[in-house]
Amino acid sequence: MGNGQRVLTSSRPSRGSLKVACTATLEPTTKTGATPTSGLKHLSEEARVRATDKKASKFEKVKVEKCGSTMWSEVPELAKLLREGTTKWEDLNLDDVDIRMKFAGLFHRGKRTPQRFMMRLKLPNGEINAEQLRYAASIISKYGEDGCADITTRANLQLRGVKLEDADGIIEGLIQHDMGSFQSGMDSVRNLTGSPIAGLDPHELFDTRPVLREMNRVLFNGGRGNEEFANLPRKINVCISPTRDDFPHTQINDLGFEAVRDPASGQLLFNVVVGGYFSIKRNIMSVPLGVAVTEDQLVPFTLALLRVFRDHGPRGDRQKTRLIWLIEQLGFEAFSNLVAETMGPGTQLTPAVHVAYDEPWERRDLLGVHAQKQQGLNWVGVSVPSGRLQAEDLEEFARVAEQYGDGTARLTPEENILFVNVPDASLPAMLAEPIFAKFKVNPGNLERGLVSCTGSQFCGFGLIETKQRAMAVVSKLEASLHLPRPVRIHWTGCPNSCGQAQVADIGLMGGPAKLDGKAVEGVKIFLGGKIGENPELAAEIEAGVPCHEDYLLPKLQQLLVEHFGATPLEAAA
Ligand code: SRM
Ligand code: SF4
């Protein structure tokens, strides 16, 4: 290669015999022997020691060798080289393709659909507009049957079927459309979530959108990536909840802010809860940190906490690197003092505020037609079964949002969509649109609570197919039972629990099972998750239940009858 550039190689082999042709200039090495393009660039000395320690996880080694943020410039270059034929797929570095590209939001689906990528976007607070929906549709439509999109459990959008040779154009297009994909995977801050009805809700204490947009801008640099937060010890989930419904699930985020009105001063404050997460080894709900922040402190507190996590967090066993592990190691008080110190000299955090309510609060259902706080306007919540969408669905959503609302919509953590700012007078014509026969405004009591992770159709971790099965099971159950109220069934393809099985009324988690002595797809069943105020995680009640209809359907029917008041349809009639 010319221009004094050298070929970068990795200790992990490339797909073929050729070495990786990468245009990054190899600069002088640092004390640790790593190049400045390594993931050590923004780390404290303590974090550098952990990242280069012999006990550091294999992902830390990959990052030290070359930071995932290098993909932000390398992917567009690689895309061009692949198109020109200068570089071939076989020449690519495996660690780049399977690990580092996730830092750019490109997830190689090598196990299920080799050479195709899932692209995860950034949509703070689940906000999306017609132009963004159309742009997303234009990306997947060119991949024909391989292209589809999913609304995620973090109120986000994932695009499927993407080819690496198109990535440069897509990345630029996403940034132009104010979405972006960088820092949506691996050791980064995940999609920032708030209330799906922020700004519309008569009951909210706070509109979560402006602060989450600002947080998103600072953390991800307008979609072009912010190296300062590119190499955390692990993923971290952040959300703000402005009502007692807790729509974004503060209880399962690493960092959650719960809006409260201080009864003594009347001031709006945000109690900080930390450490909620799910994983193969540990599932815990968040716990109060003991402090509250003001509205102005939301962004500085988050940035400081991320810096503390980055610089002091563990980088060994990946099962012990989520935020709570650092907090437990330091102690709650020492951790919050460190965050306050990092915010700046003299920063004082208010003690958490306890608010006693007279009446319990039932978490609201977002589907259906609801009056907004703005007189004469409504939001219309629509079910997207399992969150799965095709290009034409996205196009139709864009048209409906423009024709009847203000051209914007909201995605929800339940994988549904809300059309907003719809005038009363427009409702009859809107509800008569054929698209709402497919995506229902008032679905059955099981469909309205259905959530499903990606599952084995695309995800290499998936032990079972989830989305198609979830839809089929729901329609069979709805055809056989009368349900007096919605029941939330969450499917998740493996114990990572992206489909949040433990928050569901009934959670189904992919796992091994046997039928006639043969290994078959099966589930573990969880029961009794509570969300909103006073949340509880569902408890595992059974394992090894075959997914085969003859076994799973009767099991679910029985649970629905015994625990949720369902009656067989003949009996109900
Ligand atoms: Fe997840 C990894 C999909 C929300 C816990 N998750 C993955 C990967 C990236 C694995 C992979 O590389 O294949 C999955 C990509 C599959 C694909 O092709 O779509 C994946 N996770 C998802 C999504 C798409 C599920 C969905 O259908 O909605 C969600 C994307 C949200 C987003 O927009 O960013 C998703 N994942 C979650 C959640 C739920 C949440 O955030 O409320 C969890 C549990 C909460 C948590 O994080 O604590 C979750 N995902 C995991 C874990 C376990 C983390 C751990 O600490 O061990 C993994 C595995 C990992 O990170 O090592 C994982
Ligand atoms: Fe994949 Fe497992 Fe997450 Fe489902 S729960 S998306 S199967 S990692």
Image (cartoon, rainbow, N blue to C red):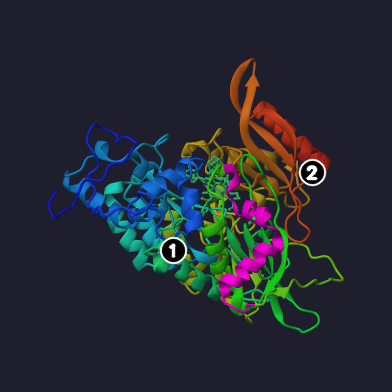
The image shows a total of numbered marks equal to 2
Q: Amino acid at mark 2?
A: Ala
Residue 434 point in image, percent of width and height: 51, 57
Tell me: 418 left or right of 506: left
Residue placed under numbered mark 2 in the picture? 566
Q: Residues within 10 Å of mark 2 (few under 14, many from 20)?
A: many
* 46, 572: nearer the viewer: 46
469 with respect to 58 (left or right): right
Of 561 and 147, the residue lying toward us: 147
Judging depth in this view, the residue of 205 and 71 nearest the camera is: 71
The reply to whether residue 147 is visible in this rendering is no
Residue 232 horizontal/vertical position (percent) = 50, 55
| Quarter of image, res 412 | bottom right
| Horizontal side, residue 15 vs residue 58: left or right | left
Magenta region, residue range:
319-347
**Mark number, residue 199:** none
Q: Position of residue 275 (x, y in %)?
A: 66, 55
User: Which residue is farthest front?
Assistant: 31
